[in-house]
Image (cartoon, helix red, strand yellow):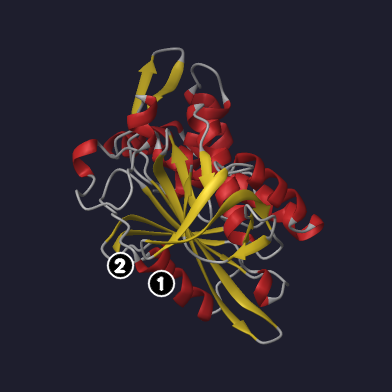
Amino acid sequence: MHPKAGTILRLFRAEVGYVSGEYLSRELGVSRTAVWKHITALRNNGYRIEAVTSRGYRLVSSPDNIDPHEIQTQLSITKIGQRLEFLKQTSSTNADAFRLAEDGAVEGTVVLADSQTGGKGRRGRLWTSPSGVNLYCSVVLRPSIMPHEAPQLTFLSAVAAARAIELTTGLTPEIKWPNDLLVSGKKVAGLLNEMSAETDGINFVILGIGVNLNMTADQFPDELRHPATSLFLESGTRIDRSSFTSTLLNELDRLYADFLTHGFGPVREEWQRRCNANGRQVVVTDSGTECRGGRFIGIDSDGAMLLRSDDDLLHRITCGDVRVI
């Protein structure tokens, strides 16, 4: 998309009703004929734009594409999203972001893909990644923290995704330790963070975020370990993928800025409020075998689960699957 076309989209969204061709021409510094050419190009890319004589133009609807230029028109950020890389198809956005980070990519670089052929979740599990329906996103961060603190960013990205879902759909997602988001008890999003570090510090962290936006029931594979859903299935409304992405990046940017200033405390507090197991009895299993039961009382500074057993002992759990009783 031409940058001028992206500016036109931003101006459409900033106004209520019609925008005159004269105003667009003045704001873009181009002729009315050039404005018309950009409008035509937008229409050819799937945007429905209404034109009325003596009133101007009005954006009626946008295509269900992930468009970096459109996303940037909706961003209000300081770091995250200042560079967007979009791929029609890739094996894994996390792997792409990792390579970019190794090559010196600026903090806040975001890799987006329409589909993934090798998407993965926690512990190497498959993340189904069809085209045209979901969000597959990875973010490069370079925080000045110690390697043992890096898991804190997984919880930060979970809170950001939960906020974005609420703002976009009105649904109230719950967070399942350590890195899944649930709606109606079914998985709608997952986080997978990876890092490059030395003994005394972090080179970079990759925040991987996958959200099921518009998948239909027949697009989910039969062999899923746990029930899954999409925001479309739960809300009954199709989600604008570019708009959702910009909302997510805005929330992620705000949370990250606060994290750098105030530390993990505020993130941990909000994460625990949103956790589906907070204060409840749970069972933790590992590879299908029950390994611990007790009351979930929160997470510690490195993201480990804090579990109080029936004999009043406090246990730190660093891996496993959690089931609320």
Label 2, residues with CA under 10 Å away: few <14, some 14-19, many ≥20: some
Front-most of residues 46 and 134: 134
Q: Is residue 202 left or right of residue 190?
A: right
Q: Which residue is found at the position 69% from the left and 51% from the top?
A: 268
Q: Whole-percent x and y of residue 298? A: 66, 51
Front-most of residues 191 and 61: 191
Q: Which residue is found at the position 58% from the left and 35% from the top?
A: 27
Q: Which residue is found at the position 34% from the left and 24% from the top?
A: 236
Q: Whole-percent x and y of residue 312? A: 70, 55
The residue identified by callout 1 is 95
Label 1, residues with CA under 10 Å away: few <14, some 14-19, many ≥20: some
Asked if residue 58 is positioned above or below residue 274 in the image, the reply reads above
Secondary structure type for disc 2 = loop
Which disc is residue 315 wearing?
A: none
The amino acid type of the residue labelled 2 equals Ser
Which disc is residue 91 wearing?
A: 2
Please, which residue is most extreme toward the right here? 262
The answer to which image quadrant residue 300 occupies is bottom right
Please, which residue is most extreme toward the bottom here? 199
Secondary structure type for disc 1 = helix
Asked if residue 251 is positioned above or below residue 14 in the image, the reply reads below
The answer to which image quadrant residue 146 occupies is bottom right
State yes or no: discs 2 and 1 in contact (Cβ < 8 Å): yes
Q: Whole-percent x and y of residue 179? A: 50, 55
